[in-house]
Image (cartoon, rainbow, N blue to C red):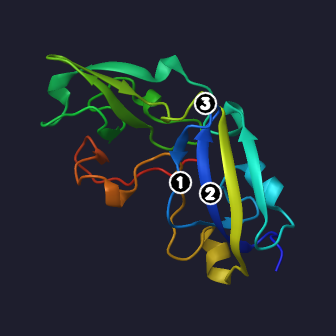
């Protein structure tokens, strides 16, 4: 079966930066719904369209084709008192607590921004709302492991069964502590799908 719209594709992949430093090389394949459902980057879908099981490719993505350019306006300094303890570099929060600039906590798709703690001082916390791979040219090596027709339910849900999406370069829920990702207001949140 060839990769076409409304097929579920299983890909082995390796993600590196422009200097070929490995960023991510998971043991299990990435599974996504092919055909413009935002399961992976559009350029990767374009390269894979019409291909068979076993196809391999190396694909270079510029920042605009991946996680976007780095936006210094998404860097924020907030009072430490607004954050729970213990607070560590690398922790992530959805939005900024008690922020007076509510309109800055969402991106153009009205999805809440995920802020990563990049520095902690006695009275202040530095937060970065950019994706950790923003501003980077990326290289993907991909190999098609499996292709199958999507079910009607998968097409309706816009993702393969058992998959909520895929987040390149982000910690998996299995790798994170319970406190690693969460809404500062106290409500739980899941990691965003980044593509």
Rendered image quadrant of residue 64 = top right
Tell me: residue 160, above or below residue 179. below
Tell me: residue 8, above or below residue 17. below
Percent across and percent down for residue 91 are 29, 39
The 10 Å Cα crowd at callout 1, few under 14, some 14 to 19, many 20 or more, is some
The mark nearer the N terminus, 3 or 1, is 1
Q: Are marks 2 and 1 in contact (CB under 8 Å)?
A: yes
Q: Secondary structure at mark 1?
A: loop
Residue at the spot 50% in from the left edge and 45% down from the top edge: 169
Position of 75 compared to 35: left or right? left
Residue at the spot 33% in from the left edge and 61% down from the top edge: 174
The mark nearer the N terminus, 2 or 1, is 2
Residue at the right extreme?
50
Q: Which mark is residue 12?
A: none
Position of 75 compared to 123: left or right? right
Percent across and percent down for residue 44 are 74, 52
Calculate the distance from the C-alpha at mark 3 to the C-alpha at mark 2.
Answer: 18 Å
Position of 73 compared to 145: left or right? left
- Viewer-proximal residue, 99 or 5? 5
Q: Which residue is mark 3?
A: 136
Calculate the distance from the C-alpha at mark 2 to the C-alpha at mark 1.
Answer: 6 Å
Q: Which mark is residue 25?
A: 1
Percent across and percent down for residue 171 are 40, 50
Rendered image quadrant of residue 47 = bottom right
The mark nearer the N terminus, 3 or 2, is 2
Calculate the distance from the C-alpha at mark 3 to the C-alpha at mark 1.
Answer: 17 Å
Q: Which residue is mark 2?
A: 13
The 10 Å Cα crowd at callout 3, few under 14, some 14 to 19, many 20 or more, is some
Residue at the front extreme?
20
The N terminus is located in which quarter? bottom right
Between circles 3 and 2, the one closer to the viewer is: 2
């Amino acid at each position: 079966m060839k990769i076409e719209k409304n097929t579920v594709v299983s890909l082995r992949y390796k993600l590196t930066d422009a200097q070929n430093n490995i960023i991510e090389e998971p043991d299990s394949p990435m599974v996504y719904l092919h055909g413009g459902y935002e399961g992976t980057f559009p350029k990767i879908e374009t390269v894979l369209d019409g291909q068979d099981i076993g196809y391999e490719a190396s694909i270079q993505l510029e920042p605009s084709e991946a996680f976007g350019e780095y936006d210094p306006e998404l860097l924020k300094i907030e009072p430490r008192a607004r954050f729970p303890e213990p607070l560590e570099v690398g922790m992530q929060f959805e939005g900024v607590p008690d922020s007076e600039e509510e309109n800055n906590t969402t991106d153009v798709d009205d999805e809440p921004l995920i802020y990563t703690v990049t520095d902690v001082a006695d009275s202040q916390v530095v937060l970065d709302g950019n994706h950790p791979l923003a501003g980077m040219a990326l290289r993907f090596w991909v190999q098609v492991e499996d292709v199958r027709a999507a079910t009607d339910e998968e097409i309706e849900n816009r993702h393969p069964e058992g998959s909520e999406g895929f987040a390149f370069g982000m910690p998996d829920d299995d790798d994170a502590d319970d406190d690693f990702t969460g809404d500062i207001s106290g409500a739980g949140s899941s990691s965003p799908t980044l593509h």
